[in-house]
Image: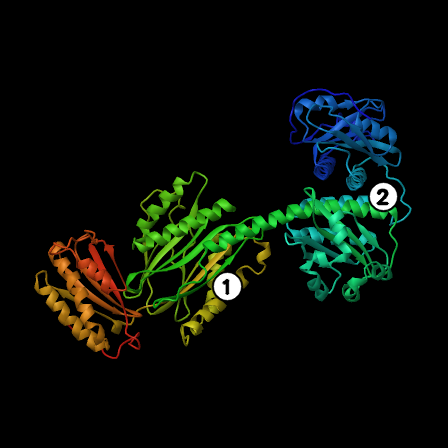
C-alpha cells in the first residue's frame, strides 16, 4: 500500500501543538481535544511513539464527526512547511491516518510522502466506544516495516492517549484485567518513564506501573556490559541474597536468558517445573529463586540488546497472547528509558567525580589549625554545583582559610570552581593579602563572561599575632566560637560578588586570642525559601552556642581534635538541613579550630643597620637555640641568618629585625624596610658573589618572601632534629 509523493525538501522540526480549532467544536463530545491537558497528552504520546520507532515525524489527527475529515491536532518533528499537507485529510484519502481510521487498526504505508527520507508511515487509531476517534501515525526512516514489538507499543500509546482525552467515550471493560485497562496503564508507565532521570527511577516506574496490573510480585532489571555479564540495576520482590547472586552473572552461564539476549526474543515460562525441564543446568538458580513463573524480556535500545527485564510471579500462571504482546512492547519501552537513564547516570557520575576531585581530599593538620568540612550537593541530582573550601598552610605557621560559591549549577560552574580554587592556592602561596588576592580573582571571574559570578571569603590567621585578616565578596560572614562558649559574628559590610565588584576590596580584622572555632559556610546551608541569610546566621549561632562547649578546646591530641570537629559538623548540618533531599542549593561548611602560638616559642630582636648586624644575629641564635634545646641546628641557622641579614644590610634599608619561631619546624625570619624582590640568579664560576640565596635554598627545607605594608620578610624553614622539642619550650626566650 503506498501513498502519493510530494517533494518539500524540509527537515523535521520540533514538537508542535496545533490549534484544535474553534472553541465551540472543541466543547462538543467527540469533536476534538482542546486545552492544555490534552496538548500534554498528545505531546507525550507523540514523543514516545517517535522515539520507539526511530521516527522522523509523528502526527496526531482527530476525526470531525460532521464530515469525517481528520484534523491535525499535534505533531512532533513536523516542519512548518509540511503542516499544510497534513492539516486536514479526507476520510477516503490514501494516507496512513485515514487508512487506520477506516480499518480500525494498525496500517503500514510504504513511501516517502513528504520527500524527507522516510521509508513509510505506521498508523494506529485512537479507539473509543463509538469507534476510531482519530489516528496516531509515525513517519519512519528505517528500512522496512516496524516489528511486532514496536507495533504493540504504538497501540498501547494510542490506547493511553485516547483514554486521557476528554469527550471520548471509553469501551466497557469486562474486568480489571482487560487489555484496554492494561493499555492505559502502559500509557501511565510511558508518562512515568518520561519523567525518570536515573536508572533507579526507571526500575521504580516499572515496579509501580507494571507489576500491579499483571499481578506480578517480582522484578529484576539487569544490564549487559562489554564482558557479556549481566549486572543488577534494581529489583523488587526478591531477597537481597538472590539479587546479589544474579549481579555480575556471566551471560554464557545463564542458559535461561542466553538465547533471549542473543536473539532479542522474549521467553515466557509458566511454572518452575517447566523451568527445570527446559534448563536443568540452572538448578541452583531455580532452587534459590522464590518465584514460580517468569517473563524474560530483552531490553533493546539503539539497535542492540542492553539487558534483561524479568517480571516474575510467586504462583504458576499461563500467559495469554495479549499479555505476551503487551509485555513485549513494554520491554522496548523500558529499554529505551533505561538507556537514556544510564547515559545520564554515567554523565552525572563523571560530573560528581569532577566535583569531588576539585575539592580537597583531606584537610591539612597544621600547628595553628585543624579543620573539618562538609559538602552537601543539592537535591537536584542532575546538576553539580560550585561550592568549595580549602585550608592552605603559609609561612610562619600562618593559615589561609577560604570558602566560596560559584553561582549557578552545572559542569561549567564546577569547572569555574576548580579554576578559582587553583588560583586561590597559587596566589595564597605568594603570600598576597586578602584584598589584593580578591583583586586578582575578580579579574579572573570577569574574564569568564558576564554570566559568571562567585561569592568568596578569604582569611589569613596569624597565630603569633592572634589575628584574623579577611575579605568578603558577597559571602556570609564568619562566625567565631570562643573557648568560653560565647558565639560572635562580626557585623561588616561585604563587597559585591567576584565578577560584579569594583576594586579595591575592604579588609577586616578580628582578634582570636588563645583558641577559637572559626565557622564558615555557603548560603545553601543557611538560606532557604523560608528564611534569609541573616535569619540563617542567627540559627547557626544558636546551634553553635548549644554545641560549642569547652570540650572542643580540650582535645587530647590531633585525632581527638578532628573527631570533635567532625561531630560538630554533623550537629550543625543535622540542625540546619534536617532533610538534605529537600534542598535546592549546594551547601558547604568549614569549621577550623585555631590555636595561637605559645609566647615561649617566639623570640626576636632588632639589629643595627651596619655590618655588625650579622655577628649579633649569630650570637642571638646560638643563645636562643641552646635555650630551646636545638643547639644541633645552631651552625646551619647561623649560616642562613648571616646571608639574609647581610643581604638586608647591603641591598635593603632598615629597620632590620630577626624573629625565630619554634613549631613543627624552626622558622627564621629577617625583616627589612625594602620592597625589592630577592631572587636566585645563576653565578658564574668567576663571580665573587651572588650565591647567597643558592646557599639559603640548599640549607633550608623551604624559603620565601612575603610583603608587608612597610617592607618585606625573608623566611626559611628547617626540619627539627629527631626527638627535638616541638612545642612550648623548657626555657623562656633568651633576651638579646
- Give the x, y percent position of residue 129: 88, 36
Q: Position of residue 393 (x, y in %)?
A: 34, 61
The residue to which callout 1 is attached is: 572
Task: Tell me the element at label 2.
Answer: helix
Q: Tag 1 or tag 2, which sits nearer the N-term?
A: 2
The quarter of the displayed image where residue 93 is located? top right
Q: CA distance from mark 2 to mark 1?
A: 54 Å
Query: In what element is the residue under mark 1?
Result: helix
What residue appears at the point 75 percent right and 54 percent down from the top-left corner?
Answer: 258
User: Is residue 588 found left or right of 306 in the rendered image?
Assistant: left
The number of discs equals 2
Quadrant (top left, top right, bottom left, bottom right) of the C terminus: bottom left
- Camera-nearest residue between 191 and 555: 191
Which residue appears at 64% of the width and 48% of the height? 341
**Residue 389: % across, % down:** 43, 56
Residue 650 lies, with reference to residue 190, above or below; the image says below
Looking at the image, residue 524 sits to the left or right of residue 237; the answer is: left
Of all residues shown, which one is farthest toward the left? 611
Estimate how packed mark 1 is, as few (under 14), some (14 to 19) or many (20 or more) residues with alpha carbons within 10 Å: many
Kindly identify which residue carries mark 2.
Answer: 180
The crowding category of the residue bearing disc 2, from other C-alpha atoms within 10 Å (few below 14, some 14 to 19, many at least 20), is many
Q: Position of residue 158 (x, y in %)?
A: 79, 37
> In this view of the protein, can residue 297 be seen by the observer?
yes
Amino acid at each position: 500500500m503506498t501513498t502519493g509523493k510530494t517533494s518539500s525538501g524540509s527537515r523535521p522540526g520540533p514538537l508542535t501543538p496545533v490549534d484544535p480549532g474553534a472553541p465551540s467544536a472543541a466543547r462538543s463530545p467527540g469533536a476534538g481535544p482542546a486545552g492544555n491537558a490534552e496538548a500534554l497528552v498528545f505531546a507525550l504520546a507523540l514523543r514516545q511513539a517517535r522515539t520507539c520507532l526511530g521516527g522522523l515525524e509523528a502526527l496526531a489527527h482527530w476525526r470531525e464527526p460532521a464530515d469525517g475529515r481528520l484534523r491535525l491536532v499535534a505533531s512532533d518533528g513536523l516542519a512548518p512547511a509540511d503542516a499544510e499537507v497534513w492539516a486536514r485529510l479526507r476520510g477516503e484519502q490514501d494516507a496512513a491516518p485515514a487508512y487506520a481510521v477506516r480499518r480500525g487498526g494498525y496500517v503500514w504505508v510504504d513511501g516517502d510522502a513528504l520527500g524527507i527520507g522516510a521509508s513509510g508511515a505506521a498508523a494506529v487509531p485512537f479507539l473509543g466506544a463509538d469507534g476510531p476517534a482519530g489516528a496516531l501515525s509515525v513517519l519512519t526512516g528505517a528500512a522496512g516495516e516496524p516489528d511486532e514489538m514496536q507495533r504493540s507499543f504504538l497501540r498501547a500509546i494510542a490506547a493511553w492517549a485516547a483514554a486521557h482525552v476528554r469527550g471520548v467515550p471509553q469501551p466497557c471493560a469486562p474486568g480489571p484485567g482487560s487489555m484496554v485497562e492494561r493499555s492505559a496503564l502502559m500509557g501511565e508507565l510511558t508518562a512515568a518513564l518520561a519523567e525518570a532521570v536515573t536508572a533507579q527511577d526507571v526500575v521504580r516506574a516499572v515496579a509501580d506501573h507494571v507489576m500491579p496490573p499483571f499481578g506480578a510480585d517480582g522484578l529484576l532489571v539487569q544490564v549487559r556490559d562489554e564482558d557479556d555479564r549481566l549486572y543488577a540495576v534494581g529489583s523488587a520482590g526478591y531477597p537481597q541474597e538472590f539479587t546479589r547472586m544474579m549481579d555480575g552473572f556471566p551471560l554464557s552461564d545463564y542458559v535461561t536468558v542466553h538465547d533471549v539476549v542473543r536473539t532479542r526474543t522474549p521467553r515466557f515460562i509458566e511454572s518452575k517445573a517447566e523451568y527445570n525441564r527446559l534448563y536443568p543446568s540452572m538448578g541452583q538458580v531455580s532452587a534459590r529463586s522464590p518465584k514460580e513463573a517468569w517473563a524474560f524480556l530483552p531490553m533493546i535500545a539503539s539497535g542492540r540488546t542492553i539487558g534483561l527485564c524479568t517480571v516474575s510471579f510467586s504462583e504458576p500462571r499461563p500467559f495469554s497472547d495479549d499479555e505476551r504482546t503487551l509485555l513485549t512492547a513494554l520491554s522496548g519501552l523500558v529499554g529505551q528509558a533505561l538507556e537514556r537513564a544510564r547515559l545520564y547516570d554515567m554523565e552525572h557520575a563523571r560530573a560528581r567525580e569532577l566535583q569531588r576531585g576539585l575539592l580537597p581530599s583531606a584537610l591539612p593538620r597544621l600547628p595553628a589549625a585543624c579543620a573539618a568540612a562538609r559538602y552537601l550537593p543539592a537535591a537536584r541530582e542532575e546538576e553539580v554545583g560550585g561550592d568549595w573550601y580549602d585550608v592552605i598552610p603559609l609561612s610562619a605557621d600562618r593559615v589561609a582559610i577560604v570558602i566560596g560559591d560559584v553561582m549557578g549549577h552545572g559542569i561549567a560552574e564546577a569547572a569555574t570552581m576548580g579554576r578559582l580554587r587553583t588560583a586561590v592556592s597559587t596566589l595564597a602561596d605568594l603570600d598576597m593579602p586578602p584584598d589584593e588576592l580578591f583583586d586578582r580573582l575578580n579579574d579572573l571571574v570577569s574574564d569568564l563572561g558576564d554570566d559568571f559570578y562567585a561569592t568568596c571569603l578569604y582569611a589569613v590567621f596569624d597565630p603569633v599575632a592572634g589575628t584574623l585578616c579577611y575579605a568578603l565578596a558577597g559571602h556570609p560572614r564568619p562566625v567565631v566560637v570562643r573557648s568560653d562558649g560565647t558565639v560572635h559574628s562580626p557585623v561588616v559590610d561585604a563587597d559585591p560578588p567576584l565578577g560584579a565588584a569594583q576594586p579595591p576590596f575592604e579588609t577586616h580584622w578580628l582578634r582570636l586570642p588563645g583558641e577559637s572555632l572559626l565557622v564558615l559556610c555557603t548560603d545553601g546551608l543557611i538560606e532557604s525559601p523560608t528564611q534569609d541569610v541573616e535569619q540563617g546566621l542567627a540559627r547557626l549561632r544558636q546551634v553553635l552556642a548549644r554545641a560549642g562547649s569547652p570540650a572542643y578546646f580540650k582535645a587530647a591530641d590531633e585525632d581527638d581534635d578532628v573527631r570533635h570537629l567532625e561531630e560538630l559538623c554533623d550537629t550543625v548540618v543535622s540542625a540546619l538541613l534536617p532533610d538534605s533531599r529537600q534542598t535546592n542549593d549546594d551547601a558547604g561548611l568549614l569549621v577550623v579550630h585555631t590555636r595561637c602560638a605559645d609566647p615561649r616559642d617566639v623570640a626576636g630582636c632588632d639589629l643595627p643597620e651596619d655590618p655588625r648586624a650579622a655577628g649579633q644575629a649569630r650570637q642571638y641564635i646560638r643563645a636562643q637555640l641552646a635555650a630551646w634545646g636545638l643547639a644541633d641546628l645552631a651552625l646551619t641557622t647561623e649560616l642562613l641568618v648571616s646571608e639574609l641579614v647581610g643581604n638586608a644590610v647591603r641591598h635593603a634599608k632598615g629597620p632590620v629585625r630577626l624573629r625565630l619561631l619554634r613549631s613543627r619546624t624552626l622558622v627564621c625570619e629577617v625583616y627589612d624596610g625594602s620592597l625589592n624582590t630577592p631572587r636566585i640568579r645563576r653565578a658564574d664560576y668567576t663571580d665573587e658573589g651572588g650565591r647567597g640565596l643558592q646557599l639559603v635554598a640548599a640549607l633550608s627545607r623551604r624559603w620565601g618572601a612575603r610583603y608587608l605594608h612597610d617592607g618585606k620578610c625573608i623566611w626559611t624553614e628547617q626540619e627539627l632534629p629527631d626527638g627535638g622539642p616541638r612545642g612550648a619550650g623548657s626555657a623562656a626566650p633568651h633576651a638579646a
